[in-house]
Structures are given as structure tokens and as C-alpha cells.
Amino acid sequence: MVGLYLSKYDSLALRKLGFESLVEAFNVIGYALGSKPASIKNYRDEFDPFFPNHRKGWHKRQIRGYCLRVLEEYKKLDLESFTGLVKSLVGYDENLWSEINVKEGRGKSETRFASRLITGLAAEQYFEAVQPSLPEFKGYAVENTTRLGCGYDFRLRTAADRDFAAVEVKGLRGRTGSLLLTPKEHESARALRERFFLFVVKNFQESPFHEIFQNPLSSRLEFTKTERVTVHVSWLASV
């Protein structure tokens, strides 16, 4: 479905999702869906012969049956509906950001999807994909703790070790950028020290790679504390 969407709407799709290029879209959506970037591109190419774009796609062979069924069912879907459907495939709920949308305006909402995937799900899925091959984490059983609010994304244990290692995953669009630790993440890094790893996935816009910082608060990284005051508005009624 993502391949069909990118083929049909092409540059419009990139703007609606907030990506700067098709390569970035392949990388981010591919990892976010637990797949490979090349798979997203291949499905885009599968549908290209059916739409008036500058690519020929896989025009020399017959479309696969299950792809044809997807084409027939979704080819007439309008841009807004198809965009919402693609966002829902990775669990992105625009309603959760409705308050921010009011403050930032509609222009910001079109880049938020890409940013949220890069800093969140795409980077986390990248870590899960490469973790078994990393010497730092070899032999560990991995538990996803992203929804537990414990100050890190993954808890790693070995059968012989009573302690655990904690991994917080961050994603960057380019080769360099800024990292933000929440108070809970900073507290976990300070408490766990050598057992806390900051796993940074870089360069989603071209070819993702990673860098690992063990005990990041005592590493070459220099964290500066910033404070921001926010106002939350609510309405109260008595019944």
C-alpha cells in the first residue's frame, strides 16, 4: 500500500508526509514497518507502469497477483484519505497532536510525521534489526520497554547476568544533529551509568548508520540543561 501511495502521488506524497526525498521515505517507512527500504522501493516500482510519472517501473513483466488486488482496491483513493491510511499503518494518530496543530499551524503538521518516525519508531526498529549482530549486545535477550515510561527503550539481559543493560534509541535525519534527553532518560542514564547505552541512528535521509555511547553522561557528548515553561488549559465542571 505504501508503494502504491508513493507511485501514485510521487512528490505530492513526499510533501504530505514531510520527507525531503524518496530515498528518505524508503529508509524511514521501511524501518518503521519492520521491513527493508529496498522493499518499499520495489513495491513503488511495481505500480509505476500504471501511473503517469517519469519512471517506467517494472513494465517488462506482469504485475503480481496480490499487488494487482491492492491496486484495484486502492487506486482511486484520494490524496488526503490515502495519506491518513499510510500514517495509520505505523500507528501515527494525528489527533494526539491536535493541540500542537492549533499552536503551530497546518504547515508544521506535514513535517511532523517524518520527524516523529525518524526519532521514534524507525530508529527503534533499526536497533531491533541490527542488535543481534552487534558485539556490544551479543547474547542478550531484548525486551521492548518503549511504552513503560522507564527512561529507556530496551532492556537487555543475559541468562547468567542478574543485572540488565538499558538502551535508549534516538534518530537523526542527517549525519549530525541535536539529541534531547527527557528528565526520566537523564535520570536513568545517571543511575545506570555503564549499564546505560545511547544508541543513535544517523543519516536516514541517505543511508542510515549508528553510533553507540556507553554511559553517555560521561562520554564526549556535552549535555546542556534547558528549561521551558508550558501552560496547560483544561475545563472543570461539577456534577
Image (spheres, grey):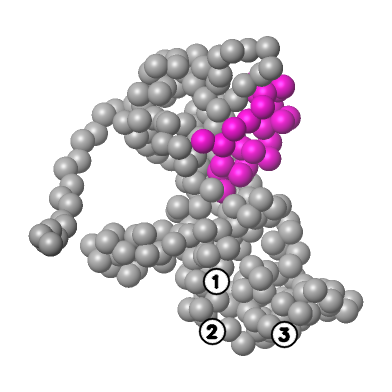
Circle 2 is placed at which residue position?
78
Circle 3 is placed at which residue position?
72
97, 60: nearer the viewer:
97
Element type at mark 2: loop
Circle 1 is placed at which residue position?
85
Q: Check the image and name the residue furthest to the left.
A: 238
Instruction: Please rate how many residues cluster around mark 2, counting C-alpha atoms within 10 Å: few if below 14, some from 14 to 19, many from 20.
Output: few
Q: Can I make out residue 169 in this image?
A: no
Dot placed on the residue nearer the N-terminal end, 1 or 2: 2
Q: Which residues are magenta?
A: 122-145
Q: Residue at x 29, y 28 (%)?
A: 224
Q: Position of residue 67 (x, y in %)?
A: 77, 74
Q: Amino acid at mark 1?
A: Leu
Q: Position of residue 24 (x, y in %)?
A: 58, 56
Q: Amino acid at mark 2?
A: Asp
Q: CA distance from mark 3 to mark 2?
A: 14 Å
Q: Can I make out residue 76 in this image?
A: yes
Q: Amino acid at mark 3?
A: Glu
